[in-house]
Amino acid sequence: MGLYHWFEFRLGLGKPTIDAASHPVPASSVSWWYVFGSAATVLFVLQIMTGILLALVYTPSASEAWNSLQFLNHNVALGWFLRALHGWGSDFMIAIVLIHMVQVFMFGAYKFPRELTWIIGVFLLLLTLGMAFTGQVLRFDQDAYWGLAIGASIMSRVPIIGAPLVHFMLGAPIIGSATLSRFFTLHVFVIPGLLLAGVALHILMVLRLGINEWPMPGRIVRKSTYEAEYHKLVEEDGMPFVPDAVWKDAIFAAAIILAVMACAFFFGPFGPTGQPDPTIIQTAPKPDAPFLWLFSVLSLLPASLETPFILIVPAVAILIMLLLPLFAGEGEKHWARRPIAVLMVSVIAVSLGIFTRLGITTPWSPIMNAWSGDVMPPKYLHERTPLEREGALVFQDKQCRNCHEIGGLGGQRGPGLDSIATRLTEDQMVRQVLQGGGNMPAYGNALNPAQTTALVAFLKTLRGNDLRPAQDASRTLTNNPPPDATVPGQPHPSGQPHLLNEPHPPGKP
Amino acid sequence: MSEHESEHLTGDLSPEENKLQSEPKAGPKDRSRRIFLFKLSLLVNGAVGVVLAVPIVRYLLGPAIEKKNAFHSWITLGNVSDFPEGETRLANYRNPSTTSWDGVTGNVPCWVRRKSGNQFQVFAINCAHLGCPVRWFAESKLFLCPCHGGAYYEDGERAAGPPERGLFEYKYRVAGSKLLINAGEMPTLATPASAQNANFVPLDKIGCSSCQS
C-alpha cells in the first residue's frame, strides 16, 4: 500500500482512473449491445502487439519481404501463428468496427451531444480500412503487387494531378522497393499513430459525455433539455461502469480474442501467394475480403461512369457520414421511429454482401484455362454430323469457353450456350461471332469461313432440352422454306400457326 | 504522509534556490514585456518551422515532382529474330531505374507482336482498366484480363469489358538486329508507357552524351 501511495503522490493517475472506471452509466446501457466499441479497442491492442512481434522478423524490402514472410511461416517457431493472429485480427477488427458503427447508428448515439464522437469514429473507420489496405501490401506477394497496380491506376484517373499522384503513391516510376517502404511507413508509423490518438479522443469523449442511454420510442433528443434529462437518468437509475457494466465488455472481448485465436489456429495465416514478380503473369489478382465489394463494383460499372464514380462517390459517402450528426443531431433515437435509417442500413448491408459474394465468385472474369480443361457433355456430340463435331472442336479450340458456360463448365462472363439456338437464329449467330457486340469481342479475324460455318452448325444443335429453335419470322414472308420441325412427325414447329397458312403442302416442308 | 513528503521535497532546495523562488513578482510593465517576448517566441518558432518545412516537403514530394521524361530510356528487348513474324510473344526487361533492393519487382514484362518484317507492336502488360496483367490467347487472338474481364484484339484495340481504351503501347525501334523500346514507367491513364518526346538514339551512340540525335 505504501508503494501505491509513493507512486500515486508523484503520478496522480490512480484517483482519476478510479473515478473514470466507476463513473455511473445508465442502467439501460448495461447491455450486450454495448460491447462492440470496447471489443474493437481490445482487437486494436492485439493488432499492435502482434504487429510489433512480426516486425521483429519482417524485412520491408522489395527483394526480401516475401522471403521474410516465408521464413516467418516456416522457420520461426510459431511465426505462422503470429501472422495468422495479425491477419485474422485485422478481419475481425473491421467486422467489429462496422458492427459498432451500425449499433451506434441504429441507437441514435451520434445525436447531440455526441456528434464529434461519431465524426472521430468515421475517421477511425477510414484509418482501420487504411490499415487493412496497407497491411495487404506488406504481405508483399502477387496480390499485393497487382493490388498496388490497381491502386495506382485508380490514382491515375484523378484529373490534372493524376501523374504526380501515381508517382507520390508509388515513390518511384514503377512498383518496387520505394513503394513497399512507403506502405511500411504508413502501416507501422503514420496510421497507427493517428489511430492511437483518435481512439484516445474517442474514448475520452465517451467518458466525458456519458454512454448513450438505451433509446425509447418517443423520447426526443433536444439540445436544450437533453443534458439535464441524461443527468437525471444517471442519478436516478445509474450504476458504476466498473464492475456492474464492464463484465459484459470483458467477457465479449475474451470471446472475440478466443475466436481470433481459433481462426488463426484452424485456418492459418493469409498467404503469401506467389512471389511479387511481375513477369509471372499467370495470376488472377484479388483484394482481401474487406475490399472485395469494391473489386466487384469496379467491374460492373460502365466504362463511361467509372472515373466519375471512383472519384466522386467515396468522397460524397464520407462527407455524408461526417455531416450526419450535424444535420440529424436532434429528434428520435429509437429505430422503430426511424424507418429510413433502418432501410438505409439494410440496403447498404445487403449491397455490400452481394458485391462481396460476386467478388468471391468473379463471374465477369474469363476462365483462363477452360479451353483445355473442361469436358464437352457427350450428349452434345452424340449423333451429330461431322461438321457439327468439327464446330465443337472450333468452339473448344478458339476458347469460347473462357467466357461461355456449356454443360455447367466454363466462364460466366458471357451467357451460357446450352440453349443458344433457341435465342438466336443462324444469321444472328454468324453476325454475333464475327462482329461481336454486347460486350463480346469480334472473332472475324480469328476465324476463317470454314471454322465459322462449323462453329455455327454446332451452336445450332444447342437447343437446351430439345426446345424450338429461334426462327427468323421474315423468312415466311419471303417464301423461303420454313424452319425444321422440332417434334418428329409434325410438319411444322409447334406453336407457329401462321406457318400453316403458307402454300407448302403438309408433310413436305 | 503526503505532508511529510512535500516537506521533504521542498527541503531539498538550497537557501539560494529558495531565495530565487521568492523573488518579488514582476510589475505590470514586466508582464507586458514577457507577453511580448512570448509572442515573439511564437513568431520565431513559426518562422523556423516554415524554414524547416521547406526541405521536408520537398523531400516528401520528391517522387511526385521529378521530371516526367526523366524515367524513360531506350532498352534492348532482344534480337528481332527472337520474335517470329505474325506472332505475339512475352518479353521481359529490367526497368532502367532500379535499386539493388528492388529485387524481382524491377523486372517488367511486355507483349511483343511482330506484324511482319521490322513492323512491331509492343504492348504494356498492364490492362488499361486497372493495371492487372493481361494474357495473350493466340487461338482466339485476344488479350484477356483476369481481374475484370477486359479484352483486347491482337492490335491492342479495346474489344470488350470495362477498359475505356486499348492497351498501352511502347515506342520501339529496330537497330541492327536488336529490338529496342522506350520504357521506364508503369503506364496508367495518366502516366505514359514511353516518353512523349522519345527520339531514337542509334545503338552505337547510346551512352554518348555529346552526340544528341
Image: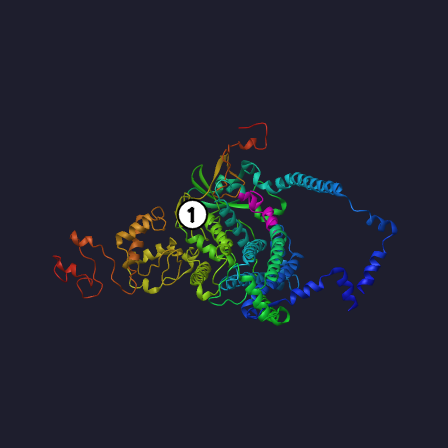
Residue A55 lies, with reference to residue A378, above or below; the image says above
The quarter of the image holding the N terminus of chain B is bottom right
Q: Residues within 10 Å of mark 1 (few under 14, many from 20)?
A: many
* Disc 1 element: loop
- Chain at tag 1: B
Tag count = 1
Inspect this view and state whether residue B134 appears: no
Identify residue type, mark 1. Answer: Pro
Residue A130 lies, with reference to residue B179, above or below; the image says below
Q: Pinpoint residue A354: horizontal percent, then vertical percent.
A: 43, 61
Q: Nearer the viewer, residue B151 or B204?
A: B151
As drawn, is B124 to the left or to the right of A17? Answer: left
Give the magenta part as a residue range: A165-184
Q: Pinpoint residue A242: horizontal percent, then vertical percent.
A: 64, 69
As drawn, is A164 to the left or to the right of B45? Answer: left
Q: Nearer the viewer, residue A436 or B200?
A: A436
Q: Pinpoint residue B18: horizontal percent, then vertical percent.
A: 85, 51
Q: Is residue A182 magenta?
A: yes
Residue receiving disc 1:
B163
Residue A345 lies, with reference to residue A299, above or below; the image says below
Q: Is residue A355 magenta?
A: no
Q: Residue B96's image quarter?
A: top right
Q: Pinpoint residue B7: horizontal percent, then vertical percent.
A: 83, 59
Seen at 61% across and 58% down, the residue is: A199
